[in-house]
Every structure is written in C-alpha cells, then in structure tokens.
Amino acid sequence: MQHKHNKHIGRIIVLFIIIFSGNIFSQKIYRTQIFDENIKTLQAGVNDEKYLSPIIDLNGNDIIKIKFDEMSHEAHMFGYKIIHCNADWTPSGLNTNEYLGGYTSADITDFELSEATTFLYTHYKFELPNSDMSFKVSGNYVAVIYEDNQYDKPVAQVCFSIVDPQVSVTGNVRSNTDIELSNRLQQVDFDVHLNGYNVRDVNSEIKVYVRQNNRFDNEVSNIQPTFINGNTLKYINNRALIFEGGNEYHSFDISSIYSASDGIDRIKYNQPHYEVFLTQDKIQTSKNYINNFDVNGKFVINYQEAMDNSDIEGDYMYVHFMLPVEKPFFDGQVYLGGEFNYNLLNDNSRLNYDFNSGMYYKTLLLKQGGYNYQYWFVPKGQNNATVERIDGSFWQTGNEYTIYVYNHPFGERYDKLIAVKSL
C-alpha cells in the first residue's frame, strides 16, 4: 500500500515539474513590433528628439512619445495597456497597482488624417507618463496596443525603459582584443561604480546587459565582473564583450520626391503611388574602412515640402532594395537590419532571391524620411546575425553600445533598472 502511495506522489511531482518547466520555457519575451499589416511606422522616442531611444528617468520631466499610422481614413478605436517586465523582457511578477499609478489602460484619442498623400492613413499618438497614468518603479515596460478593447489581440507593441539612476557607468570601446589586434572586432570594457548603493551579493543581485546598436540578436547578458575594486565592478577583457565591428549602415533619404539623395537610383511615380529604386548594393570586398556618416540604424520621418507636419503630410512609397549576388547563399538567410524593421529577424526583414536577375531583393512600404540599413547574414541553425558576410567588418566602425544595469535585491519581485549608459 505504501509503495502504491509513493508511486502516486511521484507521478504528481513529475507532472508538476513538467508543467512548471513548460511555464518557464514558454514565457513571453516582448519586442517592439507590429502584428497588423495595416499598422505602419511605429515609433517610440523621448520628447521631440529625433534619435533618442525610449528611456527616461523615473519621476523625471521627460516624456515617452509613441506614434503609428493606420493605413486608412476610417475611424478605429485603439487603446493600450502597460506591462512591467524583467531584465530579459519577460513579464515581471508585479501586479499593475504595484508599478502604475492611476489607470492601467487607456484609449488613444489623439489622431489626425493624412493630408494630400497618395496613400490614405490616420496618424495616432500618445504619451507616457500622462495625467491618467504614472510609473511607480523602474525597469522595462511594454505598451501593448489593441483595437476595440481586444486586449488579447494586439496590433502592435512598444518596448521602453524607466531608469532610476543609482549607480554610474564609465567605459570605452577598443580594437585590441584577446582574439585579434586591430582588425574586425571591438572589445567593450566598462566599470560600474556603486557610489555607496547597497548591494549584498553582486553576483546574484546585479544583472548587466550590453546591446550593440539596439540589436537583440547579439545582445550580451549574464556577465559577471572580472573583479571588484572597492565600490567598483570592473568588466574588463571579457570575451563575451567582444563584438563584430561590422560596417557603417547604408543610408537613403526619401524626404523629397524632387531630389534623389545618395543611395537612390531613381524615384518614379507609378500611378497611383511612388516607387523608390535604391542604388544596387554590392558585397563588400575592400579591406579598407570607409567612414560614412550614419545614425547606427535609426530612422527619422521627414517631408521636406511639408507645410506644417511631416507626420500627416509625409507620403508612403514602395522602396526596392537590391543586392546582386551571382548565386544565393545556401548556408543561411539574408536580412535587412535596422530600426525600421525593429532589428527583428522575421519574414518582413528577410530578402528573397531572384534567379532570373541574380539578386536578393525586398520591397517595403516606407514613409518619407531618412533611413539606415545593413545586410545581415544568419547562418543555418543560428540566431545571431553577422554583418561581415556582406557588408564587411572593421574595428574602426562607429557603433553605439548601450549598457543596462539592473538590481534584483534578495526578497524583491522585480528587476530595478539602476543605470543606462551609451558608449
């Protein structure tokens, strides 16, 4: 009898472990992205600055501004809810009243119709925090945008961060690494200065994430200090912090239909819409670095001839990307990298190959403005993209490295964001 009872308990324990493990591995990871094909040009920034990432101080004066277009002049009832996340962008264990003051969801009531454009669209926008909603704690957040109160069917989502600066970070990027000297790679070294901030166990309570040009595919996490010097955590000569230098981003500017910028072969009006044919790119074979100005993958909406507001006067155009290659790569896929694709490796960013013309190609519907992009190659069976395969890799490349420092004190239920530093 006792034997049967033990077997029964054993089955329950095994079933619990399976269910518990399944919940761990199926946890949702949030990324800024669009789910509805009628939603375009999803943006999140700070105040009216063009290139700042959506990161603001807790209880500060800055505002996260979120905006997007819906491709019609029909009325839609959009709303949003706010979710607090851990350092790895999985939902945290906090209840909404623990991280938000005021309401936990809201309608998007600020919208305008496009004016004199070949594509009809409605421009929506909202700000955070606002008079109805405030943030109580630091950390990662996501605004989930939905239509007609269908909370479980988002049309888009936007990730942003609230930082409570408690520690400081200093660092630098250098070309000499343990792997090579001044060639293709970059080493990131930095110090986290605790400045008297109380941390009982650095190894378990401090989490550091390092991101290159806001990319997630090659993000570095779970790194420990090389050594601790008093109140300073030193992350020096860490092999995990060696990044591919890559190359400067390609750029094009479609803010005017009357003048083609560098990177554009021609702009053509094919009634009823405009088409943009970019200059055919090529695989980088030169061993010499060329310093081209870029904004590390970001994009900005701009219409030069706008009377008042590019957000509703800028038009949409079909943009054709072309990369001649004698034969396709059979050992992996080619993607377009950049903020306009939210640095995601998905169907919207993957290029197709045309055997007749001998080139990779992609056509995207983009709003007038300036754009950065790269060609990323993802080998079969891998999740990290390499720039070197197509655009080359150089130690001199000017990349932006952002360091996020989180604190999860013993007994707490969430990751506090206590420092953000860009190098």
Image: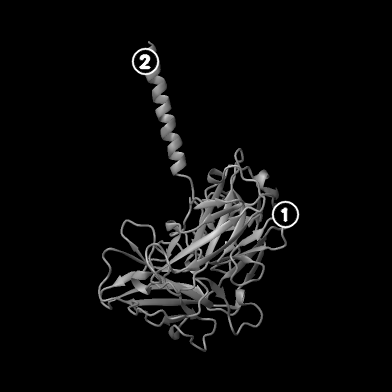
User: Disc 1 marks which amino acid?
Assistant: Asp
Is the residue 244 above or below the residue 107 in the image? below
Q: Are marks 1 and 2 in contact (CB under 8 Å)?
A: no
| Image quarter (top left, top right, bottom left or bottom right) of the N terminus | top left
SS class, disc 1: loop
Does residue 41 show up?
yes
Count of numbered circles on the image: 2
Along the line of sight, the residue nearer the viewer: 126 or 384: 384
Query: With 41 as the anchor, is 168 left or right in this view?
Result: right
Q: Give the farthest residue toward the top.
A: 1
The residue lying at 46 percent from left, 80 percent from top is 291
Residue 254: percent from left, percent from top: 51, 81
- The numbered dot on residue 4 is 2
Q: Give the farthest residue toward the front.
A: 229
The residue lying at 62 percent from left, 51 percent from top is 231
Q: What residue is pinned by disc 1?
A: 132
| Image quarter (top left, top right, bottom left or bottom right) of the C terminus | bottom right
Calculate the distance from the C-alpha at mark 1 to the C-alpha at mark 2. Answer: 58 Å
Q: Nearer the viewer, mark 1 or mark 2?
A: 2
Does residue 144 show up?
no
Is the residue 315 above or below the residue 414 in the image? below
Is the residue 301 above or below the residue 217 in the image? below
Residue 170: percent from left, percent from top: 58, 62
In this picture the colour scheme is one colour
